[in-house]
Amino acid sequence: MPDGPRLWCASCMDLDAAARDLRTHLGDFLTRDRPDGVFHVQPGGPGSVPTLADLEPPELHLDLLPEIPTDDQQATLRRLGYSGTGHHWTHPGGWRLILTDHGSGWRAEQAALRDLFQHDPGAAHAYRAAYHDGGRTHADATLRPAALAHHARTVGLTPARQVARLLTPLDAPWMIAAGYALDLHLGVTARPHDDLDVIVPREIQPQLVHLLSGWRLDTPVDGTYQPYTAPLQSPHHQIHARHPDLRGVLMLDLLLTDLSGDLWHYRRDPRITLPLDRARKVNPEGLPYLTPEAALLFKAGAAGRDPRGKDEQDFQRVQPTLTATARTWLHGALTLTSPGHPWLNELN
């Protein structure tokens, strides 16, 4: 690759090379010790699928840190030949660049759509008809249920099952959290997920190091990645684990949690706890997960911040299934931590 940025022409368009250029010139966040850069980039959009390539230009979907591009990052994109602003850019080589909203779930949904089209010619044909009928947004919405059904069949709980096999030897309680926990509660795959969150007791880190031999392990520290070294001390509580054999998600997010005294302790507010035998549920195939009211408390967002788009959708799906006891507990926890939260009225 030449030392300087490359401009592309339609005849030599190469999305893989374009993605490598983005990592090279914007910086790769995964190289550690940097507060910004490319977190993930992947091809997407109907134009990236050969059978739909005539509908739109192909796209690169970029997870960039910080989420709102800096002036320097925008200048770098322009030096690479891109034109645009904010989250939408185009390149004279014939593709678009979309900087994804980390909290919307859009990137994972687009990946599920693309996977459907690559495996089901009939779905691609239906998308084409919907596109001609109402455009991209309409076509995406029309095929979204089929993409979710395909994702549920081909991915579904596969990451959770894989990680469960990995963590079974742990001599301590652990449980799946966040979006996958809500899927286990509902008994269905409600949406594609970016990662798999798992709660583990902080004190079992020596066992984790042994079980995760061969995995890449990082710790988010002050907005950068640092190599994980045990033991990780509070307030740091996350280990991001990656392995090429982990299917269907970008990474495993291990959440070090206080489970002492047979209690689950809410990390953001020590006043809030649940008995461990109530906080930790087990689905019919033996996968342990965090009870939905506790998972939704995390998804409610920190005080003063509204829930992210995908978390609002999760709440609307799950709150009708909560027991009266769960609704009362979540209402009390939100009243304590986030007075005036928009979910409180719906929990009454």
Image: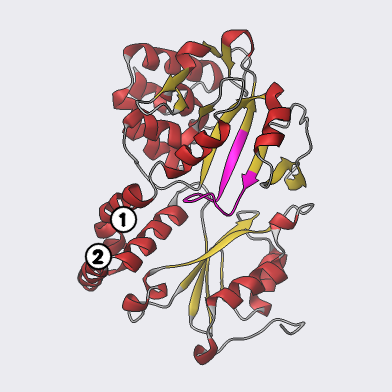
Task: Say which residue appears at 70% left-offset and 56% top-offset.
Answer: 29
Residue sitting at 74 percent across and 52 percent down?
35
The N terminus is located in which quarter? bottom right
Say which element carries label 1.
helix
Where is residue 132? Give x, y as percent: 22, 74
* Residues under numbered marks 1 and 2 in contact, where contact means CB atoms less than 8 Å apart: yes
70 falls in the magenta region: no
Q: Position of residue 17 (x, y in %)?
A: 60, 77
Kind of residue indicated by mark 2: Ala
In 3D space, how far apart are the residues under numbered discs 1 and 2 (Cα atoms)?
9 Å
Residue 304 visible? The answer is no
Q: Report x, y in % for residue 248.
A: 46, 51
Q: Which mark is residue 147?
A: 1
Question: Which residue is at a point 49% across and 20% down the rendered structure image?
Answer: 334
Which residue bears the numbered disc 2?
A: 123
Query: Given the current orientation, which residue lies at the most extreme front position?
Result: 169
Which residue is at the far top?
261
Q: Is residue 160 left or right of residue 18?
A: left
Magenta stretch in the rendered image? 241-254
**Would you say 6 lies left or right of 130 here?**
right
Q: Quadrant of residue 222?
A: top right
Q: Earlier in the sequence, mark 1 or mark 2?
A: 2
Of 116 and 307, nearer the camera is 116
Q: Quadrant of residue 36?
A: bottom right
